[in-house]
Amino acid sequence: MTAGPRPAPTPGDSAAAGDYAAGMSDDSSQALLRQALGRASLERARARRAAGIAERHERLAHVGSEASRTLHLRMAGTHRQVAARHDAAAATHSAFAPSWSRCSGIRRR
């Protein structure tokens, strides 16, 4: 027999972050918060790097043969997509981070 769907958590409910967060100490909650914020920072750096590579390919598209132009424009598009995905990952990590302070007992100072 399977259990029914979980009820939606309310703000301040430790279950809002999942069973894993319930009963966590402040130290472990703070570590998870720092980890989430660190991952967001890393993803933003990756997005900046991918955007820089895309700009380089866009510049190189104006130099050389038509085949070279096609290649560089395609590579620029690929790197723009990668940058957008890293930005989305950073936003996800940033959105996730505050849930630990609301749900796991972190006291903001």
Image (cartoon, rainbow, N blue to C red):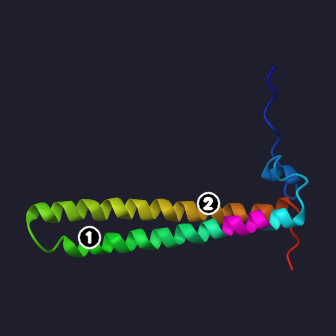
Disc ID at residue 6:
none
Disc ID at residue 57:
1
Q: CA distance from mark 1 to mark 2?
A: 28 Å
Q: Which residue is mark 2?
A: 92
Main SS of residues in magenta? helix
4 on left or right of 74: right
Residue 41: x and y in percent read 59, 72
Question: Relative to 51, is 13 above or below?
Answer: above
Q: Are marks 1 and 2 in contact (CB under 8 Å)?
A: no
Check the image and name the residue furthest to the top: 1
Mark 1 or mark 2, whichever is nearer to me: 1
In magenta, the rendered stretch is 31-37
Residue 17: x and y in percent read 79, 53
Q: Give the SS element for disc 1.
A: helix
Q: Quadrant of residue 7?
A: top right
Residue 18: x and y in percent read 80, 48
Q: Give the SS element for disc 2.
A: helix
Q: Quadrant of residue 104?
A: bottom right
Q: Residues within 10 Å of mark 2 (few under 14, many from 20)?
A: some
Question: Relative to 19, is 89 above or below?
Answer: below
Q: Quadrant of residue 101?
A: bottom right
What amino acid type should be assigned to the residue bearing mark 1?
His
- Can you say which quadrant of the picture contains the N terminus? top right
